[in-house]
Amino acid sequence: MRYLPFLLARVCAFTSIAADADPGAGELGSPVVHLQLRYEYSDFDDAADRGTAAGLTLRARCGHQFNTWKNLSGKVVGQTAANLVEDFRYPGGGAADHDIIADPPGSRLHEG
C-alpha cells in the first residue's frame, strides 16, 4: 500500500505515452492524471498540549475520460492518498502524541 501512489503515477504516465503513440487511441477518449503533493503543519495551543504535527501527502488520481457515444459519456478515476511524512494523528490512526491533520491514507474509486 505504501508504494501504490508511485505505481499509479507510473501507470498514468505510461497510459499517457501510449495514447500519444497510438493514433487510434484518441477515439476512445483520453487519460486523466492529477497528482497533488501537499505539506501541512499544525501547532494547536490547547489543553491537550500535544506535539506539533507535520504531514507530507501525495494524492494521485488516474483514470480515463471516454468520448461521447450516442449521447452517453463516462469517466473512471481511481484515487489514492499516501502519507510520505506522517508526524500527525488523524481519525482512526496516526501518532497519538501529535496534533491532528485530517488526511488519512487510503484508496478509492473517485468520480472526477
Image (cartoon, helix red, strand yellow):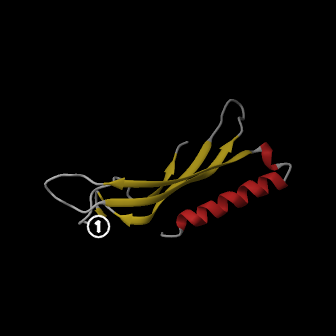
Find the residue positioned furthest to the top.
71
Which is nearer the eye, 91 or 37? 37
- Residue at 55%, 53% in the rendered image: 78
Q: Residue at x 51, y 51 (%)?
A: 109
* Quarter of the picture holding the C terminus: top right
Residue at 66%, 34% (x, y): give it.
72
Residue at far left of view: 47
Q: Is residue 79 left or right of residue 16?
A: left
Farthest bottom residue in view: 2
Q: Quadrant of residue 48?
A: bottom left
Q: In this view of the protein, which residue sits in the foreground, 22 or 103?
A: 103
Left or right, 17 with respect to 106, comes to: right
Q: Position of residue 76 (x, y in %)?
A: 59, 47
At 79% across and 43% down in the image, what residue appears? 27
Residue 33, given in percent of the width and then of the height, sits at 63, 50
Is residue 39 in sight in this rendering? yes
Q: Residue furthest right?
A: 23
Q: Nearer the viewer, residue 35 or 31?
A: 35
Q: How many marks?
A: 1
x, y percentage for residue 65?
66, 43
Q: Callout 1: few (<14), some (14-19), or many (20+) C-alpha neighbours within 10 Å?
A: some
List x then y, in percent, for residue 14.
72, 61
Q: Which residue is mark 1?
A: 95
**Is 110 placed left or right of 10 in the picture?**
left
Q: Is residue 105 visible?
A: no
Judging from the image, what secondary structure is the residue with disc 1 in?
Answer: loop
User: Is residue 86 shown left or right of residue 17?
Assistant: left
The type of residue carrying mark 1 is: Ala
